[in-house]
Amino acid sequence: MAFNFDETVQRLTDFLKTEAKTETVVGQPFQLGEFTCVPVIKFGIGLGYGGGEGRGDQNGKAKGEGTGGGAGGGVGVEPIGFLASRQDQLSFIPTRNTKGVSAVFEKLPDLLGKFMDRTAKEKAAS
């Protein structure tokens, strides 16, 4: 049986294009009271393949012709949080504890709101 690598990769790519979406993995955007929530995912994929070939009559080796091959892959999908919006407010709600740069992005809407309030108060006082 011949293994057609190009055809296999094309079929896998087509499958991933249709299936690797937030809607497929964790669901459609939904309403929660006054909030509209949009799921956010992290998606990763790894592929590998190998092949072989053989000939006959080498010292210490079996005699005859040979072939070989193999392929493998893995897919990882993880829900990382939700974008929640209400009127003109937007927040990111993580599904796990965050540290570093992602924590800054998480606090960004609140910081912008405070900055805008402070700027408005300073303009009103002038």
Image: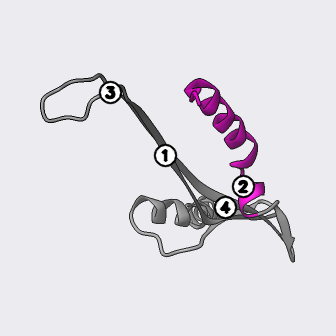
Q: Amino acid at mark 3?
A: Gly
Q: Nearer the viewer, mark 2 or mark 4?
A: 2
- Residue farthest toward the left in the current orientation of the protein: 59
Q: Position of residue 85 (x, y in %)?
A: 76, 63
Q: Nearer the viewer, mark 1 or mark 4?
A: 1
Q: Amino acid at mark 2?
A: Thr
Q: Earlier in the sequence, mark 4 or mark 3?
A: 3
Report the side of 21 relative to 67 (left or right).
right
Q: Nearer the viewer, mark 2 or mark 1?
A: 1
Magenta span of residues: 1-26
Query: Is label 2 in contact with label 1 (beta carbons under 8 Å)?
Result: no
- Rounded to the nearest angstrom, the CA distance separating label 2 from label 1 is 24 Å
Give the number of the disc on residue 124: 4
Residue 123 visible in the displayed image: no
- Rounded to the nearest angstrom, the CA distance separating label 4 from label 3 is 91 Å
Please state, as top left, top right, bottom left or bottom right, where the N terminus lies in the image: top right
User: Is 58 contained in the magenta span?
Assistant: no
Q: Position of residue 119 (x, y in %)?
A: 59, 58
Residue, x 13% and y 35% (percent of image)? 60
Q: Nearer the viewer, mark 2 or mark 3?
A: 3
> For this rendering, which residue is in front, 29 or 112?
29
Q: Earlier in the sequence, mark 2 or mark 4?
A: 2
The crowd level at tag 1 (other Cα within 10 Å; few <14, some 14-19, many 20+) is: few
> For this rendering, which residue is in front, 112 or 102?
102
